[in-house]
Each structure stands twice: as C-alpha cells, then as structure tokens.
Image (tube, grey):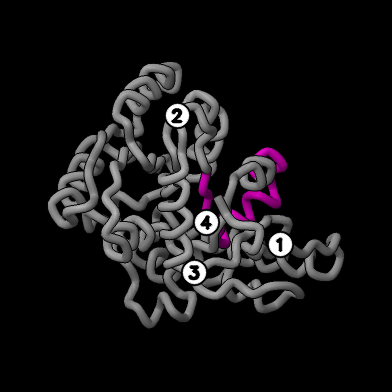
Amino acid sequence: MPTDSQQFTYIAGIKIACINRLGMVSVILDRVKSYSRGDSPFVIFDANGHAISLANSSTTFMHSLNQADLVHADGQSVVRFSQWIDGHEIPERTATTDTITDLPELSEHSLRHFLLGGSEETVSNCAQILNSTYHNFHIAGALHGYFDKSKSDEVIAHINASNADVLWVGFGKPIEQYWIMENKSKLRVPVIISCGGCFNYVTGDYKRAPLWMQNRGLEWAHRMLTEPKKLFWRYLTTNPHAVYCVLKHKFFGKKKYD
C-alpha cells in the first residue's frame, strides 16, 4: 500500500501519485509481500491524455479512476501537467509498458503473473517472451480478452486458482477499468494493473517511439503516425480536450492537495 508519506497531486479531477518507476516497483512488491488471502486486491490504473479527456466526459469513468488504490502517470503529458498546477510535481513518467519489464529488471524478487487481454496469439506470445527473457517473471496464466463477459465468473475462477501475484488486464479504456472494478471483490490476487495494449508492445506488434520522442512527450504522435486509422481521430480530439480540462480545473476547480 502507499505509505502515509506518499504524495499525490490532482490533475483535471484525477488523484495521481507522484511516484517514479522504482517507486512503482516498490509499491507492487510491498503489496504482494503483505497480502493475505481474502484481502482486497490493490488496483493500479494509469492516466494519460486519453484518460483525462475520457474522465472529464464521463462521470462513470472518473469515478472508476478515483476508486483505484493508485493512479500513475502513464503519459509524459501528465508529468508536464503536474508542473502547470499548484501542488506536488510528478517526478517521472511511469509507463505501463515500462512497468511490466521494470518489475523483473529492478528487483530480483520472483513474481507470478496472469496476463488477461488481447488476442489469443498476442497474449500467448507475450507470455512466452516475458517468461523466457526473465528468470523471475513466472507466468501463472494467460487468457485472451475476447471472452463473453457473461463468462467472467469462469475467468475469475481460473485466475484465482492460478495463485498469481499480479493480474494484468488489457482490454483498453474504459472497458478494463469497468471490468476490474466490477469484479474486484471476487478476485483473489494481491495486485491488479490495467495495461491497455501493453502485451502488443512486448510482442513488437506495436512499436515504441524513439526515446527522444518519449522524453519530449511525443509518443502519442509516433503512435498516431504509425496507426493513423486507429488513433488519428482519437488524439486529434482527446489531446486538446485534455489540455482544456487541466486548465479548467486549475483556474476554476476546487483546490486539492495531499
């Protein structure tokens, strides 16, 4: 669990942790170590420009985000936004695509992971790559995300039987957040992480932007150019809206600091 000294900041109405990549790993490991069977899972959601825009367009999604135990800055734009407002600054972007490899790379602790989402081929390949690359990344199970949601109880039983330490859910926003919060009370795992298209990045189906673009907050532009049919309209509409929402809350919203 985040300690009492953990700092947060409010960006466009979303409570976001001021945490770095090593801190993310520490929070996850601490929760796994302290978990007792029957405890409620520790839920980690991410925030980027798309999430900010969506949360400020949907009270249901905003509520889901703020019900998480920790929301982190998946996008470099969110780090920049924290510098625009009063309160604590976010020290570093904590991209979910980095977290999934930071866990085995920044710690020798062995964890059991369940991968849920993507196509059957993608999630299977992702599991194989991570399991073969890292001696301390053990696959407890892997299941595609195209199951009928009426079968969720069967999926949950499978996850619970796997004794996974970390459940990665990659259905895409906002479906993964809704599914996690709807089924949180039934899941018996220490940590649940929403991860969008993370599995596709591990397999190489989606390409990460060059590091210089990531550091300048331009990874969205790289994604838009490499997947224009899928992402052009989304970024064209959500990025300006996210900026508007941040400024609206800065100048007209209720001030909150932790």
Q: Are marks 2 and 3 in contact (CB under 8 Å)?
A: no
Comes first in the chain, label 4 or label 2:
2
Q: Is residue 237 visible?
A: no
Task: Identify whether 161 is placed above or below 138.
Answer: above
Check disc 4 and report its element: helix, strand or loop. Answer: helix
* Disc number lying in front (1 or 4): 1
User: In the drawing, does residue 134 fall left or right of residue 27?
Assistant: left
User: In the drawing, does residue 123 fall left or right of residue 165?
Assistant: left
Residues rendered magenta in the picture? 43-61
Q: Are marks 4 and 2 in contact (CB under 8 Å)?
A: no
Q: Which residue is mark 3?
A: 20
173 in magenta: no
* Distance between the alpha carbons at the discs numbered 1 and 4: 24 Å
* Dot 4 alpha-carbon crowd within 10 angstroms: few under 14, some 14 to 19, many 20 or more: few
- Give amino acid for label 3: Asn
* Distance between the alpha carbons at the discs numbered 4 and 2: 41 Å
Q: Quadrant of the C terminus?
A: bottom right
* Disc number lying in front (1 or 3): 3
Q: Nearer the viewer, residue 38 or 121?
A: 38
Q: Are marks 3 and 4 in contact (CB under 8 Å)?
A: no
Check disc 1 and report its element: helix, strand or loop. Answer: strand
- Give amino acid for label 1: Tyr
Q: Which residue is mark 2?
A: 37
* Disc number lying in front (3 or 4): 3
Comes first in the chain, label 1 or label 3:
1
Q: Which residue is mark 4?
A: 234
Comes first in the chain, label 1 or label 4:
1
Rendering coords of residue 227 (x, y %): 36, 59
